Amino acid sequence: MKLRLAVVDYGAGNLTSVSKAFAAIGCEAATCSEAARLDGFAGIVVPGVGHFGATTAISAGMRETILRRIDAGVPLLGICLGMQWLFEGSSEAADADGLAILPGRCTRMQVDLPLKVPHVGWNVLRQERTSSLMDGLARSAQVYFTHSFAVSVSDAAVATAVHGRPFVAAVQREHVCGVQFHPEKSGDVGLRVLRNFVLMARN
């Protein structure tokens, strides 16, 4: 039987590409826009692209259900905007609260010429400490980013990258994980990250 994951749909998603990536590694990823549908899945994925304000479409009921499922031990993976939502908020949308599982806020990336924002393209991951999410990745592993806002390096970081200044590329606190990059666009490295998350969900 395939492992079933819930992909939260709040209107800001790269839902199709994320679901296809999980299908490629043998998982069923079903999109969910209603809180009641999150029960019964082995893991929760919060994807997203674009403006942090889009996260306000995640209802209070969905937030409460996600927190309840996390408390029950269900792993969660936030991707790009979904990872940023795990923190307290972002200067991109000051009135929009994050889930606040992790301390800190997202801010616009600061770079010097000739670097540009948004940061788009491949970049090397710097693993900061061992983690189940980053298990098996080469030290020189590269992944694909596209973003203008990021979280400064924090204790939750298991991997960082540098675009002008270091920023959080991946986080993990027990079974809550997030990646600023797009694993569904990062080739074999990205699929390995998704497989690692799936192992967490199976366990």
Image: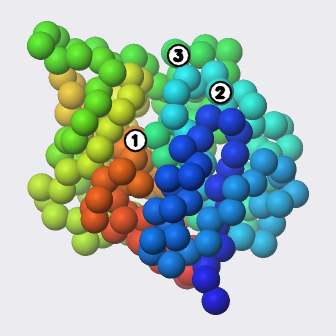
Q: Residues within 10 Å of mark 2 (few under 14, many from 20)?
A: some
Q: Measured from the top left, where is residue 178 in percent x and y? A: 47, 49
| Numbered disc 1: secondary structure | loop
Relative to the observer, which residue lies in front, 160 or 71? 160
Relative to the observer, which residue lies in front, 20 or 152? 20
Q: In the rendered image, which residue does mark 2 sit on?
A: 54
Q: Which mark is residue 180?
A: 1
Single out the mark in the foreground, 2 or 1: 2
Residue at 55%, 81% in the rendered image: 203
Disc 2 marks a residue whose amino acid type is: Ala
Q: Measured from the top left, where is residue 36 in percent x and y? A: 87, 57
Q: In the rendered image, which residue does mark 3 sit on?
A: 92
Disc 1 marks a residue whose amino acid type is: Gln
Q: Is residue 137 left or right of residue 28?
A: left
Relative to the observer, which residue lies in front, 187 or 40? 187
Q: Is residue 136 above or below residue 161?
A: below
Which quadrant is home to the N terminus? bottom right
Disc 3 marks a residue whose amino acid type is: Glu
Q: Are marks 3 and 2 in contact (CB under 8 Å)?
A: no
Q: Residue 100's image quarter?
A: top right
Q: Residue 112's image quarter?
A: top left
Is residue 102 at least partly visible in the picture?
no
Q: Is residue 141 above or below residue 201?
A: above
Separation of residues labelled 3 and 2 (CA atoms): 11 Å
Residue at 65%, 27% in the rendered image: 54
Q: Residues within 10 Å of mark 1 (few under 14, many from 20)?
A: many
Q: Measured from the top left, where is residue 137 in percent x and y? A: 23, 65
